[in-house]
Image: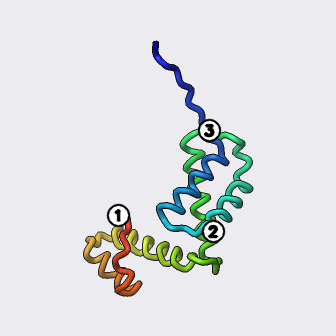
Amino acid sequence: MPVQTTLTAPGLEEFLDALVARVQCESGVPGALAGQARAVTARNLAHLGPLLSGRDDQRRVSAYFAGVLRRAAVRSNAPGAAEYRRRIIAASLAADLRRSGADEARVTEELAACLGAGRAGLRLAG
């Protein structure tokens, strides 16, 4: 007898919790910054309702959260915020270089020149 399952859209709160966990684990975002971005996003996107209606809502919430997180990192002096700002700058620089056609060796060289030799080992997704 086949098992029937019902797939439901994630709730806004549940989705934000997952975003917070992901940025803390994958990007090393300080908990205070992630929590602040979560609260602002929840407050400003509450009009979407308790359930997200699909992928478009999820993308919208993810993009809004990322923007709030970047703005919070720029303004914050919380522990870890400076390192996260450096990662944002490095990722932006690497993306710009890749869009311009630079190969990975050039990307690494430019990052080392801009961020210092000790930070050249940052691994950035391509």
Q: Quadrant of the C terminus?
A: bottom left
Q: Quadrant of residue 34?
A: bottom right
Which residue is rendered at x = 54% and y = 42% of the image?
A: 55
Q: Quadrant of residue 106?
A: bottom left
Which residue is rendered at x = 36% and y = 70% of the image?
A: 123
The foreground one among 61 and 29 is 29
Q: Give the number of the disc on residue 126.
A: 1
Q: CA distance from mark 3 to mark 2?
A: 27 Å
Considering only vertical position in the picture, is 65 above or below 101?
A: above
Q: Quadrant of residue 91?
A: bottom left
Q: Position of residue 41 (x, y in %)?
A: 67, 57
**Secondary structure category for the residue under label 2:** helix
Residue extending furthest toward the top: 1
The foreground one among 90 and 1 is 1
What residue did someone put label 2 on? 33
Query: Circles 3 and 1: CB distance less than 8 Å?
Result: no
Query: Circles 3 and 2: CB distance less than 8 Å?
Result: no
Q: Position of residue 64 (x, y in %)?
A: 61, 58
Q: CA distance from mark 3 to mark 1?
A: 30 Å
How many badges with numbers are in the image?
3
* Mark closest to the chain's N terminus, 3 or 1: 3
Residue type pointed to by label 1: Gly
